[in-house]
Image (cartoon, rainbow, N blue to C red):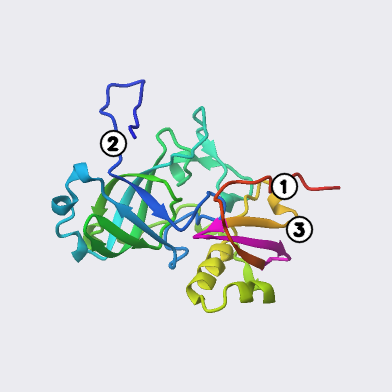
Amino acid sequence: MTIQNEETDFPRLQPIGVLESCFKEKFGTPRQPHLVPGSTARLRVLPRYSPEHSLAGLSEFSHVWLISWFHLNTNKSFHPKIHPPRLKGGKIGVFASRSPHRPNPLGLSLAKLERVEGDTLYLSGIDLINGTPILDIKPYLPFSDAAQAPLSGWIPDHAFPELEVALSPRALADTEGQPALRGLITDALRHDPRNRRDATQMKEGAELEFFLCDREVHFSVRAGAATVSRVEAAKKFEKKFRRKKPGP
């Protein structure tokens, strides 16, 4: 895979690997890292980058920066203002946001490095979808990466509401003996994955679903609470007609 900007003479970008993530589609993937601490991924560094040498010493760090390419970005033109979910329909400059819809669709995520085994990094607390091309890895340095007395701009005045999450008896049975999966589902839904500008998703009680690990999670939201109705084995990770327009 090669990523190239045809309008310039800049060098081509070559992914060093493709992320294998527990999140299988954009819907349900957290909007920022560490919102779902139990989320997991692994990254195998391609052989041409000599992982036996290029990863030497990385296992001594607790966190890493991942520079990624938003490969599912569908924008065909540049929009200087975007609609962050927190603004509930309001607009803000794209460079005052972390929206994936950017002039160059580059992502920056801080992930917890669980371990390094051979050519593979095992990660947690991620916010990236399965299949994301990773362009670079950099170790997190707290003495220089953690700013002193930082300001968070417009974010504190626009807190994103959290949902209460409950699993139905059927969903509890579907996840019996899998506390990690239950926690992952709860954290993913707690931060409300719905798009507030999508009337289909925001309809009270709408039946929604998303892929997570090897499961398909079915849920609905009513009065600020999400209820997981069932958790099924996902035989195929493919999108369905599940965002139908709401009825009368």
Q: Which mark is residue 176?
A: none
Rounded to the nearest angstrom, the CA distance separating label 3 from label 1 is 10 Å
Along the viewing direction, whichever of 5 and 78 lies nearer the viewer: 5
* Residue 214 inside the magenta-drawn segment: yes
Rounded to the nearest angstrom, the CA distance separating label 2 from label 1 is 38 Å
Residue interval drawn in magenta: 211-228
Within 10 Å of disc 2 (Cα), the crowding (few <14, some 14-19, many 20+) is some
Q: Mark 3 highlights which residue?
A: 204
Which quadrant would the N terminus be assigned to in this image? top left
Q: Amino acid at mark 2?
A: Gln
| Label pair 3/1, CB-CB below 8 angstroms | no
Q: Amino acid at mark 3?
A: Glu
Precedes in sequence: disc 2 or disc 3? 2
Along the viewing direction, whichever of 124 and 91 lies nearer the viewer: 124
Q: Residue at x 67, y 46 (%)?
A: 198
Q: Amino acid at mark 1?
A: Ala
Q: Mark 1 highlights which residue?
A: 199
The quarter holding residue 12 reads top left
Which residue is outermost to the right? 248
**In the displayed structure, would residue 38 be above or below residue 18?**
below
Q: Is residue 53 left or right of residue 212?
A: left
Give how far across and how far down residue 136 sits, in percent.
27, 46
Give how far across and how far down residue 52 sits, in percent.
15, 53
Kindly report the secondary structure that dominates the magenta region of the rendered protein: strand
